Image (cartoon, rainbow, N blue to C red):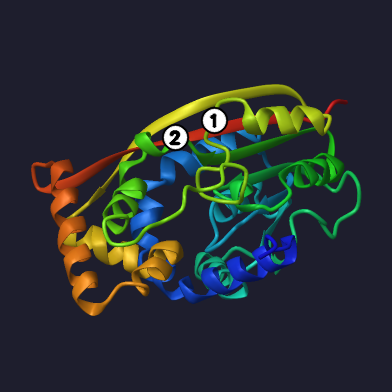
Amino acid sequence: MPPPTAQQIIEAQRQDWNRVASGWEKWDRFFEQNLACLNHRLVADARLRTGHHVLDLGSGTGYPALLAAQVVGPQGSVIGLDVAESMLAVASRKAKTLGLANITFHTGDVTALPFGTGSFDAVTSRFCVMFLPHIPKAATEIARVLKPGGWLAAAVWSAPDKNPSLLLPMNVIKQFLDLPQPDQNAPGIFRLAQPGDLAAMLHEAGLTDLMEQEFLAEWSYPSAEDYYRSLMDIAAPIQNLMTQLTPQQQREAEQKIVAAAEAYRRDRALVFPFAVRVVAARKPL
């Protein structure tokens, strides 16, 4: 069987993200609280200020686009781009609730941005780039739409062993399914986990002043049961694999995931470390 085309990959991702959009809305407050540090880091690394025009790639339910809109103010603007219209519908509702009139959300392909050259003062992206079929092509498009002197700030997941909340359910499911070794060059959550991978692609696209840091932080869940419920609400890949198990196996997998998560209990909560690669780059003047 031939490998899927880029369009087939994007369409499958669109369907997956649309399916879990309601789950992301359900857990929105949780992720807003636990990832605020990363959202602010991206806004800072993109050097956003009043009046800037910003493009946010892979906006999902609105972050860091909504924070960016508050920073650039009424004199600036933010466009959030994502493949999943249902996720963006959540983001649009949040923008309306926050009274933000300077932000709009659109579906689109990051590897063929529908904007003119030099349209944006900055580009941000949180947990998007590693899922793209053609990352170098996207890097070229990002460089094209940036104004000279403009900054990109992007966050991608670091190594699996530094992100146990992401790795744990996969380790359990492997006890029930014979899963092939993931293709390290295929779109996926850890596609850009290695130091220098994304920075090299951005350099090749013509961006300079490259900075990369492994950003270490923690997020917490009230209970192991809450952790499991969040997985089943928002993690499309885990959902897809769980449907391959029998009902009995699903119950056993749930019990094993909950039990394994208890290893991260700290007092009255579960506290997971996480590691993200934050990469910033500038378009030459």
Q: Are marks 2 and 1 in contact (CB under 8 Å)?
A: yes
Q: Which amino acid, by three-letter code, is at mark 1? A: Gln
Q: Earlier in the sequence, mark 2 or mark 1?
A: 2
Circle 2 packing at 10 Å, graded few (<14), some (14-19), many (20+), is many
Farthest residue toward the bottom? 247
**Where does the N terminus fall, quadrant-wise?**
bottom right
Q: Is residue 43 left or right of residue 179?
A: right
Which quarter of the picture shows residue 148?
top right
**Can you see residue 108?**
no
Residue 218 occupies quadrant = top left
Provide residue 54's location: percent of width, then percent of height: 72, 48
Position of residue 4 measured from the top left corner of the image (x, y, whole percent): 68, 63
Q: Which residue is mark 1?
A: 194
Quadrant occupied by the C terminus: top right
Q: Tell me the amino acid under the disc marked 2.
A: Ala
Residue 97 vs residue 242, the one in the foreground: 242
Does dot 1 land on a helix, a strand or a loop?
Answer: loop
Q: Residue 118 in the image: state x and y as whole percent.
A: 88, 44
The residue at the far right in this view is: 117
Give the class, few, some or many, for how many residues have Cα within 10 Å of label 1's Cα (few <14, many ≥20): few
- Residue in the picture at 24% in, 71% down: 250
- Taking the image as drawn, is residue 124 in sight? yes
Q: Residue at x 65, y 33 (%)?
A: 198
